[in-house]
Structures are given as structure tokens and as C-alpha cells.
Image (spheres, coloured by chain):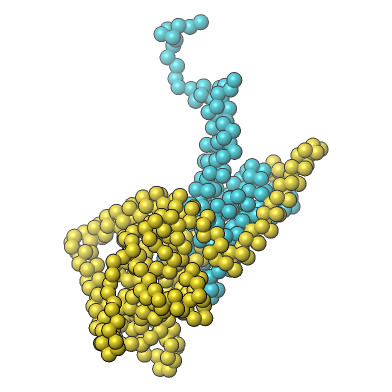
Amino acid sequence: MIEAGLAPRTKANPYRKRINREPSPLLATGVPYATIILASLLPLLFVADTGPLLPPLGFLMLIGWRLMRPGLLPSWAGLPLGAFDDLVSGQPFGSAILLWSIAMLAIEWLEARMPWRGFWQDWLVAAAAASAYVVVSGVVSGAKLNLALAGAVMPQIGLALVAIPALSGLIAWFDRLRLQRIRKVG
Amino acid sequence: MAPPSSRRSGHSRRAQYSLFTSYVIAAAGAVLGAVLLGVSLWQPSAMSGFRGAAADATEPAGQAAAAVRAGSGSLLDDVAAYFRAGSQNAALREELELARIRLAEAEATRQENARLKALIELSESEGKPVAMTRIISSTSTSARRFAYIGAGRLQGVRVGMPVRSERGVVGRIREVGASTSRVLLLTDSESVLPVRRASDSLVAFAEGRGNGLLRIRLINLGINPLKPGDVFVTSGTGGYYRPGVAVAVVTSIQPDGGLARMIADPAGTNFVRVDPIWQQQVVEAATLDTTQPAKATEPDQ
């Protein structure tokens, strides 16, 4: 046994912290839900009086997690998460429950047919989902449908397309956070 | 690469059943969502209790963001003023703009007074606001234009009350929570407001279009007398809004009216005031149920 005072000074070893540690189950399962809820809440902080200002961040976060980690979110995750989004998004209650559930099932269906995936394909899938979501949620929002409204949601779709890669980078960071080895084994 | 699919449940019965169950729940969720959506479109206030609770829960973050917004706004103004023409320029410009609006409103008030003096004496005063508060958040991803303010049932706010800033009308209370309320902004496509031109008594409706502009629809069709720059103020018809509050400035002309920009810019507004309903008895006479204004008799819904 080596005395504490006599132990040779070793450099900080990044692997030392990981020995005898495992990911916390709370973080491993909770981070996706927490980040999707936060993404639903974030648009509230911006005051948009002229038109839809931000892309549907909650939905993009859900799709991003679903594409990056298949099987992590159960396919019914759209039900509770969509219900929360409906409470704060300004849409009539039920629209996100419906659309998020359909999106989860549609991606499941798509994945069975095209299991091979890459960055561009994920972007394409998320872009198609986000564009369809913006259009359909505008249709069911209860707003009077006219050309002016159609013009107002176009920037939102454009922003969503641009935001997808940035969000997937963010999700990758959250995924590393999710699997941080912080729980002591034994 | 091919991702590890959750679909491959292998030979485990348990895994197969749980996968199947998750699909059933997801499909049931979609159906439930469709039913709830139908109910919400049919009865828009159906889930207002839950929405109110959610808005109340997120109020502190909204208040903090509103404070930051106000602070950063003035900082930006200061920087802008420095770069433009000295520190007072921005302040003076804002004052001038306010003075212009006030001038238009004063003109409207003069007209109103002249008209009312011809009628019997109808007592009308500014009155005390129900609440002075901030716009704390808004629904910035939806196609609907709602905002939340930091005053609710506990402060005496009720459904239908008009909300205005120091510049003009912002919108009307749509749902009330304990300490927050949801405001239907003028720019929402469901908002219709009876207005008249400040310089004369040309009456019109200001309808939201959903893209930030208001459509001024004249009631008397004929030669379109509008000019860009015309200021429209509330006419008081319907009983919700006090007459003579600034609403919109015409920016372009259309065959049957024009497009106008809202004068009160909610994003740039620091404080808003909630006023009592101007003529409660008019509203009550025009509507069967005060929470659900009837569309046929009430143009302001």
C-alpha cells in the first residue's frame, strides 16, 4: 500500500474518472424528455406579433432524438410530449398530440423500409417532417386560411430546415451528457 | 450506417408484445389527439384551465425574459442613438412618434366630443386600469397570434377586457389564468375590431391577417378614400373598446380598403394596461353569454 503523501504526482487522467462508474439511469432516460419539453417552452420567451417567428423547436427536438437514437423514445412518446406542447404552443389542444404521434409512427414505418441512413438522409427526413408539420399545424390552428398566412409560415419552414443540423449537433451533445458516467458502481 | 432498430425484437415474446403495445398506444394517441383537436376547434376554450395552469407555471421565466427584453431593448436604443446622432436622438424620435399618435388621437377625441354633444350626455372617462403589467410571452411558433400577460383572475382580469399599451390597442383578453392571461393580438386572423379614421368618421373593420398586417375593410363601399398614412382609431362600436384609441396606420391601398400596420408594437412594448370593458351593458345586450360572444351580433370576435 502506498502512503498518500508518498504517492507520485500523476497527471490528471481522464480515464480515471470513468473507472467504476456507469451512466445514471435518471439522466439516460430523462434527458430526451427534458430537452424536448424545454424546446417546447423556449419559443414562449420571444414576443412574436407579426407572424410565426421560430421553427417548431419541440417537434424538431423530438424528430432529432428519434432519428439519432432509434428506440430510445417509445413510439407513443408523441402523446405525453405533444400534450405538453399543446398547452404552451397556442395551437388548439390535440394538434400536437395527433401530429407528433403520426410523425413517430411514420418514421418507424420509414425506418423499416430504409434502415440505412446518413446525415443527408436524416436531414431530408427531418426537413420533410418539419415542413409538413408547419403546414398541417397551420391548417388545423383555427386561423383563417389565406395567402397572407401561407406567406407568413414560409420563413418558418426555411428556419426549420436551417435549424435541423444545428439541433442534431445539440442533441449529440445532450446524448453525451445523457451517458456521462457519474453513478458509482457497487 | 444502419442504426440498431427498435423494431427487431428477435424471438423474445416479451419484446414482441411490448413493441406491439407501443404501436397500439401510439395509434391510440393519434386518434385521441384527433378527437381532442376536433373538440378544441369546436369549443376553443375547452382546455383553458390546463393552459392557464401551464401559463401560470411558466410565468417567472416569462417575467425574467420580459425584464431582459426591456433592458436589452433600451441598451440597443442607446447604442443606436450614439452611432446615429448623439444620445438624445433615439429618445426624441420616440417622443415625436408618440406625440404624432397623441395628436391623431386628440383629433379623434375632438370629433367624438362634437358628436356626443349632439346626443344626450353620455358619461365617459378614461377610468382606472384593471391592471398594469408586462407582456411576458407569446406563441411564437404557431400560426395563431397569442400573447400572455402577467395579470390574471387574481388581479381582476376577465375575458373580453381590452389590452393596450401607451401607443395603442394591443388586443383583447381571451383566456384567464390565476396570475396570467392569454391575449388575442390584433394581428391574429380571428381578430376583428371596429375602427374609424381619426381625421373624419369613416368607419371600417380592422381584421388581422396572420402575417403582421391588418386589413382595413370599409363598410361603405364606393370610391376608396384611403391614403397611406391614415391613422385609424377604435370607434367604440360593440362596447369593448373605449373610442379614440390608436389602432393602425394605413400602409398600402387595396380596391376595397387597405393594409395597415399596427401602431402598438407588442414586441417593443414594455408595459401594457388592461382596461375594463368600456360599455358592459352594451356587450351584455349584444351577447347571450359573455364568455362566448355570438358571431352574428358581435363583430368584435
Residue B158, quarter of picture: bottom left
Observer-nearest of A3 and A85: A85
Residue B162, quarter of picture: bottom left
Q: Is residue B136 visible?
A: no
> Where is residue B182 shown, x and y percent of the image?
44, 62
Residue occupying image coordinates x 43% and y 69%: B160
> Where is residue A116 shown, x and y percent of the image?
70, 48
Observer-nearest of B79 and B180: B180
> Where is residue B44 shown, x and y percent of the image?
55, 66
Report whether A55 appears left or right of B13.
left
Observer-nearest of B172 and B251: B172
Q: Is residue B26 visible?
A: yes
Report whether B24 appears left or right of B33.
right
In this rendering, is residue B265 above or below B63?
below
Residue occupying image coordinates x 76% and y 39%: B15
> Where is residue A143 shown, x and y percent of the image?
53, 70
Residue occupying image coordinates x 63% and y 65%: B38
In this rendering, is residue B232 above or below B145?
below
* Chain B tint in image: yellow
In this rendering, is residue B77 above or below A17?
below
* Chain A tint in image: cyan
In this rendering, is residue A120 above or below B196?
above
